[in-house]
Image (cartoon, rainbow, N blue to C red):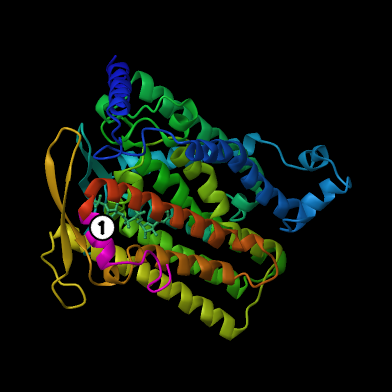
Amino acid sequence: MAAHQEKKLAEERKHQNMQNGTKTSQGQWGRAWEVDWFSLASILFLLMFAPLIVYYFIMSCAQYQCSLTDPLLDLLTGNKHLSDIWERTPMLTYRAAGIYSLWVTFQVVLYMYIPDFCHKFLPGYMRGVQEDAVTPAVVNKYQINGLQAWIITHVLWFANASCLHLFSPTIIFDNWIPLLWCANILGYAVSTFAMIKGYFFPTNAKDCKFTGNFFYDYMMGIEFNPRIGKWFDFKLFFNGRPGIVAWTLINLSFAAKQQELYGEVTNSMILVNVLQGIYVLDFFWNEAWYLKTIDICHDHFGWYLGWGDCVWLPYLYTLQGLYLVYHPVQLCTAHALGVLLLGLLGYYIFRATNHQKDLFRRTNGNCRIWGKRPEHIECSYTSVDGTKYYSKLLTSGFWGWARHFNYTGDLMGSLAYCLACGFGHILPYFYIIYMAILLTHRCIRDEHRCSSKYGKDWERYTAAVPYRLLPGVF
Ligand code: NDP
């Protein structure tokens, strides 16, 4: 079987490299092949605790008005037992299973069978078949139609809320915990399926990566681009839909719940809906650009992406809206304006920085950035088969300020969502803490990869652009 041969080859390569005393990172696809103890410990920690963390946050809101300390205090003082908390937790229901199955099926249908129409009335929108992620086996092609999936879903949502009344707009909030069990079932099912598929029927055996460590392979994935048939791409589907299409619907459902409970929607809830809505819309407008991000170009598909997209993203990225259902915060005008400006500025930096790199790479440097010819560093790298490639690293525009200024913009936007919730509780601030850890780790991991890839050229680049996130600070 192709995958077994590839696995054997990978093990032989690893053995040879160890004998030669060479590092295995240069020119290889995806993540590290040798699993160091720190990575393994982090992976085991996440596999064990990430589902508990999600449960703890959601349960804290449902049972403790979003207090993160009260459940712990109750348990430590013996006031409550774990079984008491568990007994008050809603279980999986047929209704939730039905809603969730219908939701995922609907997104599959939109993804697979509805050709894009948005380009007919939206000039400049990139869609249709796009090429990207060149791997040792193939040049991957993707069907881009995410924006229309988002539009159709939301038009139906508003049609139902305003005139059809087939279901309540609070449906997501009302089934939040039963839906969590459904999301977990899908998250674990798809990650386990991806692992089995990687071993027994991979889409491209040459793109599989076996580290020999079961937990690492399960978490970080074996297959680079698992697919079913020609077009059903696991990474593109699971990251964008159901996860990101759901994000804005979840927020709308939280806003509807506020309206039902308090007779009004607070300005903080509107801010969270608007700012996160812009971020989500941007994602779909630029879905073709997303093909150039680390998720698609470097990461393999395992539990990290599969479970993360099904559970972590929809449940933890929406904590602000959930919090505001339990604590409706009405901000004073100055506070609301400050949050709006920070959110918009963060979004602008995030988008403009990503756009500058995309434009630079797409035109091979034949473009203008801030009205000038872009400055850059010529670099080269050699792949495992010995072929030499050339590339360019941009050193002007926002990319001259810091090496990951796009992350800085993202962090500013994330902070704005949290600040919209006021200062009453720590829970809505989880997002900025998480994003700071995620993006700092991503920054280090990406630089480690780029340094192995470009060697001395990367050193010249870091000398030209010395800061990572904040010019003059970090
Ligand atoms: P980047 O878009 O920054 O891509 C990094 C890659 O770009 C590098 O591996 C390198 O690839 C290339 N590169 C690095 N420096 C330069 C340069 N100076 N000039 C040209 N190319 C360069 O990272 P991500 O894919 O991580 O992030 C994309 C966006 O998505 C970010 O804005 C991030 O904030 C956001 N994001 C959001 C998340 C969320 O959960 N909300 C999660 C993750 C990301 P090469 O090998 O081609 O040289």
| Vertical arrangement, residue 261 with respect to residue 42, above or below | below
| Vertical arrangement, residue 4 with respect to residue 282, above or below | above
Identify the residue under disc 1. Answer: 459
Left or right placement of residue 416 versus residue 30 in this view: right
Residue 466 counted in the magenta span: yes
Left or right placement of residue 198 versus residue 84 in this view: left
Q: How crowded is mark 1: few (under 14 residues within 10 Å), some or many (20 or more)?
A: some
- Point 37% across, 27% down: residue: 210
Left or right placement of residue 253 versus residue 136 in this view: right
Q: Which region is colored magenta? A: 457-474
- Point 39% across, 36% down: residue: 301
Q: Please give the count of numbered marks on the rendered protein.
A: 1
Q: Nearer the viewer, residue 76 or 132?
A: 76
Query: Toward which corner of the image does residue 22 lie, by quadrant?
Result: top left
Left or right placement of residue 19 versus residue 364 in this view: right
Image quadrant where one finds the N terminus: top left
Image x and y of residue 291, in percent: 28, 49
Q: Which amino acid does label 1 sit on?
A: Glu
Q: Nearer the viewer, residue 138 or 150?
A: 138
At numbered mark 1, what does the secondary structure look like: helix, strand or loop?
helix
Residue 98 showing in the rendered view: no
| Vertical arrangement, residue 172 with respect to residue 356, above or below | above
